[in-house]
Image: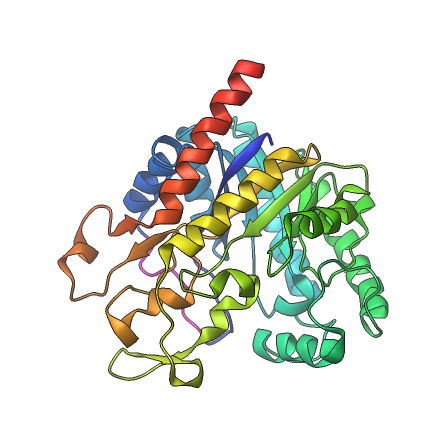
């Protein structure tokens, strides 16, 4: 595994009326975080996702200064094809500028386009489109790879690949580095379009053997694989839910307490999250086709930790926890504290880097 690191959010807008997920955006904080990712987490790469291109540039320069390879992931949600193509063209120009400045950079040409963008799956929001996915899968169950999915998924995949081919062409007209895409597990992507196979590859209840067997689908394309994101929430039972663990938190009351599924606050378990992250990293490190893997996610604004029903951190995948505004630690530098998964990932990254250096 050549690249190993974490996903870093600089601000996403989950609908046109939402504020960006990171507010305010603090370049000093970003510089601190990138140094921590490189020096304390012992990562050598970071996937930077966000909508505002200037924020992506700022974070990418900070990452480059810290010695990190950048997976540059511009992401404009709820946009149709024409708007997305214009946005991607602008982002590709920014990425090419960074590349010419010396940054080691991979362009991520979108993330789960069918769910987060308009025009392929029915629905006008991510929630409507993701709901449609669950409805269509029905008795089929949650897939472990795109193989054998029922209609209309194969037909929708043809539409997706036409869009991705056009977007990739737009990027290549400007950007001279490698391209990938961050695919949902139910998106059957034509990987001939890209240089690197990219998948959001979460484990649920699979054994190591089953998980590796499903990973073989992505390796069958003859290209290196980037695990664009993987992780789980920090509560008992979160590991078995993988990418769907966030659903345990269904909203927030006016008093700041969480609205939890079935009215039950899950039991916090940072160890379960740490075990999951370490287990996945060990699997990826043994698979020669896996070139990169990114733990999701560094921090997640809007999900502060707390006691009981105020522990909104239970509903996110962050490996460093944030604090509520009334906690003095929220004003410190940094305003986060590592969780057990952070320490476990740091130990793995440090050891993996040492092995790679000795073998080199």
Where does residue 306 sit, x and y in percent of width and height?
25, 67
**Residue in the image at 42% along x and 43% along y:** 59
What secondary structure characterizes most of the magenta part? Answer: loop
Q: Nearer the viewer, residue 351 or 322?
A: 351
Q: Residue 79's quadrant in the figure?
A: bottom right
Q: Is residue 132 visible?
A: yes
Q: Nearer the viewer, residue 238 or 98?
A: 238
Q: Nearer the viewer, residue 298 or 194?
A: 298
Q: Is residue 43 visible?
A: no
Question: In the displayed structure, does residue 181 sit left or right of residue 280?
Answer: right
Question: In the displayed structure, does residue 44 sit left or right of residue 25?
Answer: right
Instruction: Identify the magenta region.
Output: 18-25
Q: Is 111 drawn above or below residue 101 in the view shown?
A: below
Q: Is residue 23 magenta?
A: yes
Question: Considering the image in quadrants, where does the N terminus appear?
Answer: top right
Q: Residue furthest left?
A: 328
Q: Is residue 104 magenta?
A: no
Question: Considering the image in quadrants, where does the C terminus appear?
Answer: top right
Where does residue 193 sit, x and y in percent of width and height?
79, 46
Q: Residue 128's quadrant in the figure?
A: bottom right
Q: How is the image coloured?
A: rainbow
Total tally of numbered discs in the picture: 0
Where does residue 30 sit, x and y in percent of width and height?
34, 44
Q: Nearer the viewer, residue 106 or 93?
A: 106
Q: Is 207 drawn above or below residue 141 in the view shown?
A: above
**Residue in the image at 59% along x and 77% along y:** 125
Where does residue 343 sit, x and y in percent of width and height?
36, 41
């Amino acid at each position: 595994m050549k690249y190993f690191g974490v996903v870093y959010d600089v601000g996403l807008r989950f609908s046109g009326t939402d504020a960006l997920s990171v507010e305010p955006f603090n370049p000093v904080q970003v510089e601190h975080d990138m140094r921590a990712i490189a020096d304390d987490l012992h990562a050598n790469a970071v996937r930077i996702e966000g909508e505002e291109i200037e924020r992506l540039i700022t974070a990418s320069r900070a990452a480059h200064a810290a010695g990190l390879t950048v997976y540059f992931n511009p992401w404009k949600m709820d946009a149709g094809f024409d708007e997305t193509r214009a946005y991607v063209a602008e982002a590709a120009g920014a990425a090419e500028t960074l590349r010419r400045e010396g940054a080691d950079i991979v362009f991520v040409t979108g993330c789960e386009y069918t769910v987060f963008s308009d025009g392929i799956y029915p629905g006008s929001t991510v929630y409507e489109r993701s709901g449609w996915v669950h409805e269509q899968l029905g008795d089929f169950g949650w897939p472990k790879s795109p193989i054998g999915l029922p209609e209309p998924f194969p037909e929708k995949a043809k539409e997706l690949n036409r869009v991705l081919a056009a977007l990739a062409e737009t990027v290549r007209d400007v950007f001279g580095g490698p391209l990938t895409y961050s695919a949902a597990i139910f998106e059957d992507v034509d990987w001939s379009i890209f240089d690197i196979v990219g998948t959001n590859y979460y484990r649920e209840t699979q054994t190591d053997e089953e998980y590796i067997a499903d990973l073989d689908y992505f390796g069958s394309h003859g290209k290196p694989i980037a695990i664009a994101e993987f992780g789980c929430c920090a509560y008992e039972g979160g590991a078995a839910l993988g990418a769907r663990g966030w659903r345990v938190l269904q909203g927030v009351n006016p008093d700041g307490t969480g609205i939890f599924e079935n009215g039950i606050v899950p039991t916090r378990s940072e160890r379960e999250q740490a075990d999951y992250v370490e287990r996945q990293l060990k699997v990826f490190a043994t698979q020669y086709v896996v070139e990169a893997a990114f733990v999701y996610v560094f921090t997640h604004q809007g999900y502060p930790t707390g006691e009981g029903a105020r522990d909104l951190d239970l509903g996110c995948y962050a490996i460093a926890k944030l604090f509520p505004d009334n906690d003095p630690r929220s004003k410190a530098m940094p305003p986060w504290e590592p969780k057990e998964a952070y320490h476990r990932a740091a130990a793995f990254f440090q050891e993996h880097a040492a092995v790679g250096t000795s073998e080199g």
